[in-house]
Amino acid sequence: MTEVIGVRFKEVGKVYYFDPDNTPLSTGDMVIVETARGIECGEVATPNKKIDDSTIVHPLKKLIRKATPEDLAHVEENRTKEKNAFDICEKKISAHKLDMKLVDVEYTFDNNKILFYFTADGRVDFRALVKDLAAVFRTRIELRQIGVRDEAKMLGGLGICGRPFCCSEFLGEFQPVSIKMAKEQGLSLSPVKISGTCGRLMCCLKYEQEAYLDLLKNTPKVGAIVNTPEGKGTVVEQNLLTGSLKVKMDKAPAAAPLAFKVKDIKIIKDAQIRVDRKEIEQLKGLE
């Protein structure tokens, strides 16, 4: 077992483990640590705890120190510099006529590097831009192309549910989201209804999936053959959250389907949920 602390460097970013070097720390404490990018200031997300050696990559970098008031003042100074660097970089991008969108700028704590995050439809030759930026800032420059999900996480905003983006509120890392999840949750496969502001499938489909799979274990799927209090029929509609079904009765196929509760139904032969090729082709750009 090894004692660690979990540190994140962005408000809702990935948590990285460090050796606390026998220093007791609490959630929310600011600390100075060494990372692959250099010396950084981060926030303690997980206080001192012991975890199994197999879950971490050795050797762990040690805590340098708990952040001092001077360190925090330096972080604020860097935030001001980042705004200035953003404006300068945007002007340089325009001057070089590059087809790219600047999203964010980040100074490392030790000012040894400035990172410029951008989005673009394809590859961008930004070598001349890097030379220009290096001449202005006289430090190491890194341009990093990110995806639309990362852009949404950095910029934040409101989703179609009216709440702040999940990715910028509490999701530390992105998880794969599939079209099949939307179909299993009984959602319309209209791109407008299942995609977020970023234009990709909504992240909530992933973290809600486990609950829907649990409901599907006891709920007949659309197309299932069932026995009802009114006789045998085929499920034509289901609502997983309310536990209600609509069943087309064999004895009256031309009549309107009847509504039943799942608890009153007995499954004779369940159906399968499949995403056909046409649906995959239509929505492949969303995953």
Image (tube, grey):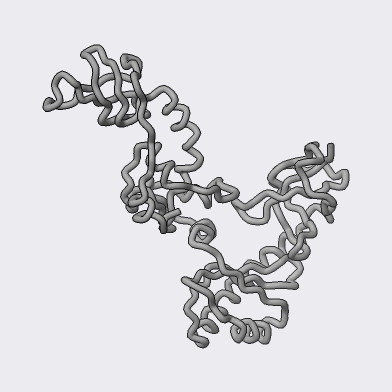
In-image side of 141 versus 57 (left or right): left
Q: Compared to 5, does 142 lie above or below?
A: below
Which residue is at the far left?
A: 254
Residue at left offset 66%, top offset 73%:
142
Q: Residue furthest top?
A: 229
Q: Nearer the viewer, residue 30 or 203?
A: 203
Which residue is nearer to you in this view: 18 or 249? 249
- In the drawing, does residue 203 fall left or right of residue 277? right
What count of labels does the image hold? 0
In the rendered image, residue 196, in percent from the top left (x then y), is placed at 41, 53
Q: Is residue 11 above or below residue 38?
A: above
Q: Position of residue 122 (x, y in %)?
A: 49, 73
Left or right of 155, for residue 159? left
Which of these two is toward me, 42 or 192?
192
x 51%, y 40%: residue = 207
Residue at image position (31%, 31%) is: 222
Q: Quadrant of the N terminus?
A: top right
Residue 216, position as x, y percentages in the image: 42, 28
Identify the residue shown where x is 64% and y is 51%.
14
Q: Is residue 63 visible?
A: no
- Inspect this view and state whether residue 82 appears: yes
Relative image position of residue 90 (x, y in whole percent): 52, 79
